[in-house]
Image: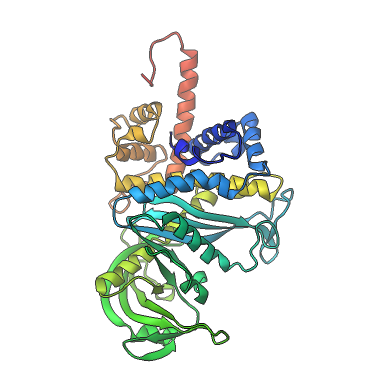
Amino acid sequence: MWASSEFGVALSEIHGRNVSSLKRAAETVYDAVGCSFSRALGNTFRQAVAGIFAKKEMDTEKMLKGHVQATVARCAAASGEVIVVSQDTTYYNLNSQHSLSGLGLIQGKLKGTLQHNALAMDQRGTPQGLIYQRNWTRGGLNAFDNESAKWEEALAAVNAALGAIDKQVVLVEDREADVFSFFCARRSGNVELVVRVCQPRYIEVLDKGRAVPLQQAMELLAEQGELETEARRNNRPVRLRLEVKAGKVAVLPPKDTRQDKARDLSLVMAREVAATDEQGNSVYDAAQAACWLLLTTCPVEDAVAAKQVVRWYALRWRVEQFHYVLKSGGFKVERLQFDDVHTFFNALSFYSIVAWRVLYLTYLVREKPQAPAEEYFEPVEVNLLQASAQKPVKTLEEAVMALGKLAGFQKTKKQPLPGAKLLGEALVKLQNMVEGWRLFETQQNNTNFSLQD
């Protein structure tokens, strides 16, 4: 099953029996999206897995070791010539977890932890897995001296993991990464940056021969036409129509440093002129219309290249969807009950692999709808989906549609496939059906009839 590739080569420092337990726990939790840790695993197995999380020698790097290796293999084998890696930080509000020791402040008086992730995807946006993750508390476990270092730390992880694959790797990040040193950081020859910028620094627009503040620089860029792309707003997908401008630039360093300017960059502006929701209704609001200023190391020689940079940036929202699945859209990890942040961090890394799997299935069906269902579902699950849908389930698309039906999904022209949250709910119902069928089989063990035949 899928967990073998994510945990099979990891955790060499601990007993093989623990690795087997993590594999079984991952597949059990995956099949029970929405259920609590205790309910999904049962009391005895829960205690055993929690004991693995609590081991002193366990940490995020060890927990994710096999998954990262599997992610690199998926990236190398992915169709297309580009891998996009989106990095972002999320906060876990644990203010109500009074028995959880080691927490720090995340905002005001709220207590919790922070997590930074770099999620790799193919050029269509199908998540291939995590390349990097760091969990920390401010002033406590794994704390940074300067939190802006997370961007370069993730870049170094991308260099190490993907620098040797035969594909271009584009690392995209939001405004928090607008740090001058990040533009000058070492990159592997196949790694490029796309950063949304906002700092009021001076930009030299090369073909104009002028150095002006960022907001003035955008007006000096050359028109590159329009494009449409998908993004997320208020955690819902929207389709944006954007006007695009671009130009070659250099970035002047901060005045209090002796650094040279950052060269060989392009500035791409994408400004929203229209927006529609999943039903095709206009949701354009001038007050919140997007205006992305993207500084990139990618060569931008023409309108095609400028628009491609915008499309790559639009994929950044995949990492936010990943955080949504971890927190609100499925696993509700902020409710996990552990005694200390060390154990909690290892649980977060474990759940991160399972959350990736849910998001992966959500987008894989869009990329490979005709893939055999049996590659992603057990035979008993396929047969139960067929019985529920009252039609054959041979392909991944048919399996996902049958799954969606369990959670009340209704196909529309604008939303032909269920999203991650709905699939999570459906996986819980499917697992309940599997458990019910196996109980029935146990009680009817004198018969020859079995869904797994």
- Residue 448, quarter of the rendered image: top left
As rendered, which of 346 and 223 lies closer to the eye? 346
Q: How many discs appear?
A: 0
Quadrant of the drawing holding the C terminus: top left
Residue 51, placed above or below residue 218: above
- Residue 107, quarter of the rendered image: bottom right
* Percent coordinates x, y for residue 319 in the rendering: 46, 57
- What's the colour scheme? rainbow
As rendered, which of 151 and 355 lies closer to the eye? 151
Left or right, residue 251 beside residue 13: left
* Percent coordinates x, y for residue 412 in the rendering: 30, 49
As rendered, which of 79 and 311 lies closer to the eye? 79
In the displayed image of the protein, which residue is found farthest to the top? Answer: 446
Residue appearing at x 54%, y 87% in the figure: 255
* Percent coordinates x, y for residue 259 in the rendering: 52, 82
Residue 380, placed above or below residue 319: above
Residue appearing at x 50%, y 39% in the figure: 7
Residue 197 appears in the figure: yes
* Percent coordinates x, y for residue 362 in the rendering: 39, 46
Quadrant of the drawing holding the N terminus: top left
Residue 320 appears in the figure: no
